[in-house]
Amino acid sequence: MKLRRCAHLFVELDCQPRFEFITLLNGGDGFDRSPRWLAYAAHLDFPVVVSLEEMALLQAVHPDHWIALTEIETCFAASMVARLLNVGLLVGDDIAANEWRERDERVRAVAWWPPAAIAHRYGRWQGVDTKARIEAGNVLTTDEAVGAYGEPPSHDYRRRPSATPQRLDAPLSGVLDGFLDKRKTCRNYAADAALDSAAFATFMRRVWGAVGQFEVGRGTVALKKTSPAGGGLHCVEAYVLVQRVAGVAPGLYHYLCTEHALESLQELSHEAAGEHAHRFVAGQHWFAAAPVLVVMTARFDRLFWKYRRHAKAWRVAHLDAGHLSQTMFLTAAELGLGAFVTAAVNDHAIERALELETEREGVIAVCGFGPRAAMATTLELDDLQPTVATRMLGAAAP
């Protein structure tokens, strides 16, 4: 057998206290505070504890050149090599190593900037339930956070407090101002209300639909949508979890942006759709009640095809999702509906439901929209105090 090191590997000296039952038996407080080395690889879901001897072994094996197992075992213990193969930090060319090698090769096939690959992989959530954490008292209130951390940095941020700022002219007014004023995050949705088909189609076409395309080169097509995107690639895809839409059965769908059509991925009962929604948004029940949830994923293989191992490209995917979210909010404001976007999502659950390969396509955010509830049970920013500028410009308006 031949082996090589995995494509991307980062090592951290971890000093965080961690529960260790044996310390209780020895009369301690139950926490181990000894430092340890953690190895993070872009194709693994969890870091691996490694010793200094194992780090020396990893250093001796090149990530791009295969080396015979017998050759490496002349310098390092066979048991150490076997462990690193078992946990995936080393990958082999035999059948037994297929899973780790296939994952590692998917990472290699997409031209990730290594720090971004690690951040994306380990920033994903699994099994988080916000509602349960709140009920258990594990989420600090604002007052508790201030008590624990002090007051937050000021909302009125100034770099030159002693300088007199130059006042700007009153802005031009137009139709867009009304929609911008109405734009807000809705946390109260009518639990039984369905979204009508026309409104649903309007959201999908206006926000995620492609209005044109241009062949830049052989096999390379740039898209034009209502929102900007890095390189014209529009790497963000829209997957739709339908709970209550007139004329559309509950289920998971993929939106085809050039055809303005849905391809069905999985039919669901109303109950199953609701369970998916709760898991997707990590128990944020105020969002899970929306009749439509849209998972925005980034096709990293498409984006990094052009921006290969680029230090800025990973940011572009998140910027693209932000542009799309604002277009969605403005559409909701025009239609008189509620909307939200959140990055507090259970990536692992979404990936399993959509059958995504996270090395090639990963979850960025979940948004949703639908009719508002008649009565608000969750806080929304309704009773606002005007800023200094709003008071001045309002007084000057005709």
Image: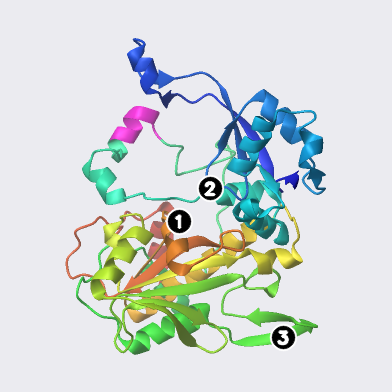
**Residue at position x 67%, y 56% in the image:** 107
Distance between mark 3 and mark 2 Cα atoms: 38 Å
Residue at 27% in and 60% down: 286
CA distance separating discs 1 and 2? 10 Å
Q: Callout 2, which amino acid?
A: Asp
Are there few (<14), some (14-19), or many (20+) residues within 10 Å of tag 3? few
Q: Give the range drawn in magenta.
A: 144-151
- Front residue of 180/318: it is 318
Q: Name the residue under label 2.
A: 45
Disc 1 from disc 3: Cα separation? 35 Å
Residue drawn at (61%, 36%) of the image: 83
Which residue is disc 1 drawn over?
Answer: 348
Q: Which one is closest to the eye, mark 3 or mark 2?
A: 2
Q: Is residue 95 left or right of residue 201?
A: right
Based on the displayed image, in which of its 4 quarters is residue 384 positioned?
bottom left
Tell me residue 262's x, y (percent). 45, 85
Q: Can residue 117 be seen in this view?
A: yes
Q: What residue type is labelled 3?
A: Phe
Mark 3 residue element: strand
- Quick one: label 2, few (<14), some, or many (20+) residues within 10 Å? some
Three-letter residue code for mark 1: His
Q: In which quarter of the image is the C terminus?
A: bottom left
Q: Are marks 1 and 2 in contact (CB under 8 Å)?
A: yes
Q: Which of marks 3 and 2 is nearer the N terminus?
A: 2
Q: Which type of secondary structure does the marked residue at label 2 adopt?
A: loop
The reply to whether the magenta stretch includes residue 149 is yes
Q: Position of residue 380 (x, y in %)?
A: 28, 58
| Among numbered discs 1 and 3, the one appearing first in the sequence | 3
For marks 1 and 2 on the same chain, the one whose residue lies earlier in the sequence: 2
Residue matched to label 3? 214
